[in-house]
Amino acid sequence: AIFDLVKFSEEITEEMQMVAKQNQNIIYQHTGTTSVVNNDAGLLKNCIINLISNAIKYSGENTFIEFSTEINENNFLITIKDNGIGIPLSEQKQLFEPFFRAHNTGSIPGTGLGLNIVNRYMKLMAGEIEFESAENNGTKFTLIFNL
Ligand code: ATP
Ligand code: MG
């Protein structure tokens, strides 16, 4: 379906801000001339909510989460970046496996299924998912769709 990515993202930001921690600010920004895209809004929303939920859960109070969308001539990108605990380099290759949880999650609850689902949804939408992370230095996920 064709929808307005900025309006859609602003609504998600509002929803997720309500479940964020104390002084955890979700900052949304869009780059690009237009904001209309053709995509599965339901699957995409589920992916973004999963990634923002992780950003909230794996980062502390008094931090900010950057959520951005970018529409270029040939693709559109969605990024979610936090300043949280990060994912240890040695465990990153297992990130999309079902039930995977990194050793530094400590007592933070979770089942390890969220990212496995996001990864499957991205395949269904013919998109790609990339990430960059370092332990104690935050995590950034990028969803990529060719236009
Ligand atoms: P749930 O199934 O409820 O989402 P979960 O959050 O543990 O549980 P995933 O979302 O699949 O599961 O994430 C898998 C693991 O990847 C997490 O347990 C955590 O170790 C690591 N991880 C994911 N996102 C982040 C993040 N933003 N910062 C740090 N670690 C993360
Ligand atoms: Mg999760």
Image: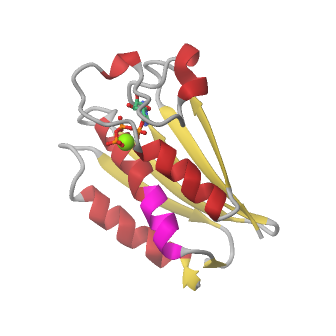
- How is the model colour-coded? secondary structure
Residue 40 in percent (x, y) is at 56, 74
As rendered, which of 124 and 50 lies closer to the eye? 124
Instruction: Report which quarter residue 19 is drawn in.
Output: bottom left
Which residue is depicted at the point 53% across and 19% down?
91
Report how many numbered discs are placed on residues in the image.
0
Which residue is depicted at the point 55% across and 83% down?
3
Up-down relation of residue 110 to residue 26 (above or below)? above
Residue 58 in percent (x, y) is at 34, 33
Which residue is depicted at the point 61% across and 48% down?
142
Q: Is residue 25 left or right of residue 79?
A: left
Q: Which residues are magenta?
A: 41-48
Q: Is residue 24 left or right of residue 31?
A: left
Ligand 2: give its quadrant. Answer: top left
Residue 84 in percent (x, y) is at 38, 30
Which residue is depicted at the point 43% across and 19% down?
136
Would you say the magenta stretch is mainly helix, strand or loop?
helix
Residue farthest right in this picture = 74
Instruction: Report which quarter residue 131 is drawn in.
Output: top right
Residue 94 in percent (x, y) is at 55, 27
| Observer able to see residue 132 | yes
| Observer able to see residue 79 | no
| Picture quarter with the C terminus | bottom right
